[in-house]
Image (cartoon, grey):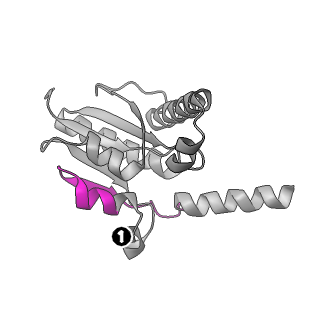
């Protein structure tokens, strides 16, 4: 295994991130690289609100929740199979784009992100794939949503509507 070679992959906890993680796992296997799945998180309400009213016990719970989501996505992506790929998961506090660009800081890294949205919409301001393409120090692969799979945003809106209707 090439010790210096890493495949860094952004994981959000969505169904789409499971597919992206599987793609990154395959690529890490082909390259003989270490797989580094990264779950970025921010405090509820954002960093400015947290700085105004810090609560370390809540921050600890949010970080633990992010770790639990990362573990769940890893378990789903692996599907109970073992792998020869070394996996070094990371949970990092911060916005996803900057966190991923910071972690994938070596020229021989490969950064894998979900495109999240179809077509040119993935390059709109605020997208992780756009930020990664502009700021990463290594090659970036943006994996589009699979056919029939809604984007994370679409799935979240559907779940929100279900919750509102059920209430």
- Report which quarter residue 35 is drawn in: top left
In magenta stretch: residue 19: no
Asked whether residue 43 is in view, the answer is no
- Residue 88 screen position, x and y as percent: 33, 27
- Report which quarter residue 125 is drawn in: bottom left
Q: Write the start and end of the magenta stretch as one range.
A: 130-150
Residue 60 lies, with reference to residue 10, above or below; the image says above
Left or right, 86 with respect to 56, comes to left
Name the residue at the front extreme: 52
Q: Which residue is mark 1?
A: 123
Q: Residue at x 29, y 25 (%)?
A: 86
Asked whether 26 or 61 is in front, the reply is 61
Q: Quadrant of the N terminus?
A: top left
- Residue 140 screen position, x and y as percent: 24, 54
Asked whether 161 or 52 is in front, the reply is 52
- Residue 78 screen position, x and y as percent: 44, 33
Q: Quadrant of the C terminus?
A: bottom right
Q: Secondary structure at mark 1?
A: helix
Q: Residue at x 52, y 35 (%)?
A: 66
In magenta stretch: residue 143: yes
Q: Residue at x 32, y 63 (%)?
A: 130
Asked whether 46 or 49 is in front, the reply is 49
Left or right, 43 with respect to 37, comes to right
């Amino acid at each position: 295994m090439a010790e210096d070679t890493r495949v860094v992959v952004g994981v959000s906890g969505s169904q789409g991130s499971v597919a992206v993680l599987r793609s990154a796992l395959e690529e890490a296997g082909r390259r003989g690289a270490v797989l580094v799945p990264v779950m970025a998180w921010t405090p509820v309400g954002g960093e400015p609100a947290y700085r105004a009213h810090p609560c370390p016990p809540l921050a600890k719970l949010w970080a633990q929740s992010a770790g639990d989501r990362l573990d769940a996505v890893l378990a789903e992506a692996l599907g109970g199979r073992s792998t020869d790929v070394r996996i070094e998961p990371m949970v990092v506090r911060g916005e996803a784009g900057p966190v991923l660009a910071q972690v994938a800081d070596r020229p021989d890294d490969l950064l894998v992100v979900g495109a999240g949205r179809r077509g040119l919409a993935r390059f709109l301001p605020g997208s992780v794939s756009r930020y990664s393409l502009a700021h990463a120090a290594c090659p970036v692969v943006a994996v589009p949503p699979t056919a029939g799979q809604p984007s994370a945003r679409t799935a979240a809106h559907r779940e929100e509507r279900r919750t509102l209707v059920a209430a």
